[in-house]
Amino acid sequence: MTRQYKAPRGTQDILPADQPWWDYVRDTAARLAREFGYAQIETPVFEEAPLFTRGVGEVTDIVQKEMYVFQDRGGTDLALRPEGTAPVCRAYLEHGMHSLPQPVRLWYITPIFRYDRPQAGRYRQHHQFGVEAIGEAGAAVDAEVIELLWRLCGELGLTGQTLHLNSIGDQNCRPAYLEMLRGYYRDKLSGVCEDCRARFERNPLRLLDCKQEICRPVIAVAPPIADHLCDECARHFADLCSYLDAAGIPFALNPRLVRGLDYYTRTVFEVQPREEGGQSSLGGGGRYDGLIEQLGGKPTPGIGFGSGIERIVINLKRQEAPLPDARPLQVYVVVQTPAARVPAFRLASDLRRAGVSAVAGSSERSLKAQMRHADALGAVYAAILGERELAEGTVALKHLADGTQETVALAEVAERVGPA
Ligand code: HAM
């Protein structure tokens, strides 16, 4: 027996029925990005693996456990893109974008690959809409990027989401904080989960966002990093909060928000949907002032976010958000007699040229079967070409929703049904 193939675990087909949701999210994201002055960028699906090992961080889950790595036939170590920021920074450097007016504002929609444990809202291939603003250190651009993500959720019709905000300091203040955090945890290690014992050694900041029940009481009274920022980081954070206030964007300070990628400095943020679960965040990001330098460039600040399109679609459906009208098929040309085959083909072709969506039925099928097909495709009109119509140079144009029918000259069909 031949084997039945399935989409690989953790991946999914985005079928035609779901495409209107995807179009809606992609179109809204692209329009907003343009309104905010961002330009689109596309980078390859795979990159040299060390870009991520160096850029995202060797001790992150994404690099250690989740990256799809392979050697190509030439022996180069490559990785399927596990996140969108490092590739954009690589492109910024490779194309000398530092010589453009700063910040350089970029956006992308792209597939992302992570060998994660698949569950609702968590996939091995997902898609992110992301933006990166590179080359500006002031907090106004942080607020701008956050505003873009916030507006996206609102314009799409999502309600009840919350914006979580934190600052995780920089190379000046974070080391001392991490020592303090270690000091706090040192005599509590027997009471925390195994992962946290490893985090204590390798990546202590991640202790703060452990989701295990057993670790919660320890996290609850851990010293918050926001209380231990250096003056510059504290000022930057205060500036950001006042910009967000000015833009009327409500936020919740969350001292446990640290995020899972190593490149973050100062600002980190996430937008959580109204309903928890579904693997949560609709989008998240932060500042990465050391990343470009890490990748071999001059010290250059940057900030951005990524937002999972699958999760947005899940939440739009869950909240029964109204989907703007999908564009239906306008005309189904019904071939009632074999002699109408070529004229029907021609009519469909002419309609499309006039900007009207149209398909022609098949003369192999009965009138009834073609009408059923037109219904199944959701066509607005059936344009029926029979003996009489052929002789007269007309069609019988039937409005399928209300059943009304009229005779229309072939040359006038496009005008009669209007543009797509
Ligand atoms: P991230 O938090 O790893 O950040 O991912 C961003 C968003 O992608 C998440 O908030 C979530 O909506 C979605 N997402 C992440 N993993 C999955 C998954 N396995 N399945 C479905 N959706 C997922 C980044 O990737 C950073 N590059 C964001 C960024 C841009 N920071 C600065 N600039």
Image (tube, helix red, strand yellow):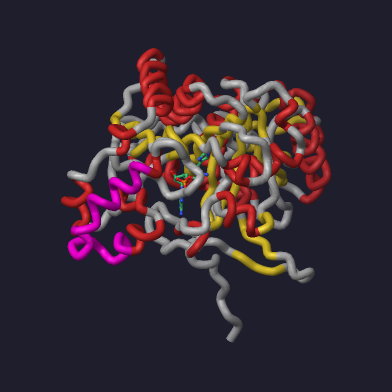
Can you tell which quarter of the image residue 350 is in?
top right
The answer to whether 420 is drawn above or below residue 376 in the figure is above
Measured from the top left, where is residue 171 in percent x and y? Answer: 46, 39
- Camera-side residue: 198 or 187? 187
**Residue closest to the eye, 168 or 250:** 168
Asked where in the image residue 96 lies, by quadrant, the reply is top right
Pick the front one: 187 or 226: 187
**Residue occupying image coordinates x 54% and y 67%:** 8
Return the residue found at the far top: 246
Magenta-colored span: 176-197
| Residue at the image point whose x is 48% and y is 26% from the top | 142
Please say whether residue 188 is one of the residues in the magenta stretch.
yes
Q: Position of residue 4 (x, y in %)?
A: 56, 76
Residue drawn at x 61%, y 38% is 108
Front in this rendered view, residue 376 or 270: 270
Residue depicted at x 35% and y 53%: 204
Could you tell whether 408 is left or right of 185 in the image?
right
**337 left or right of 252?**
right
Quadrant location, the N terminus:
bottom right
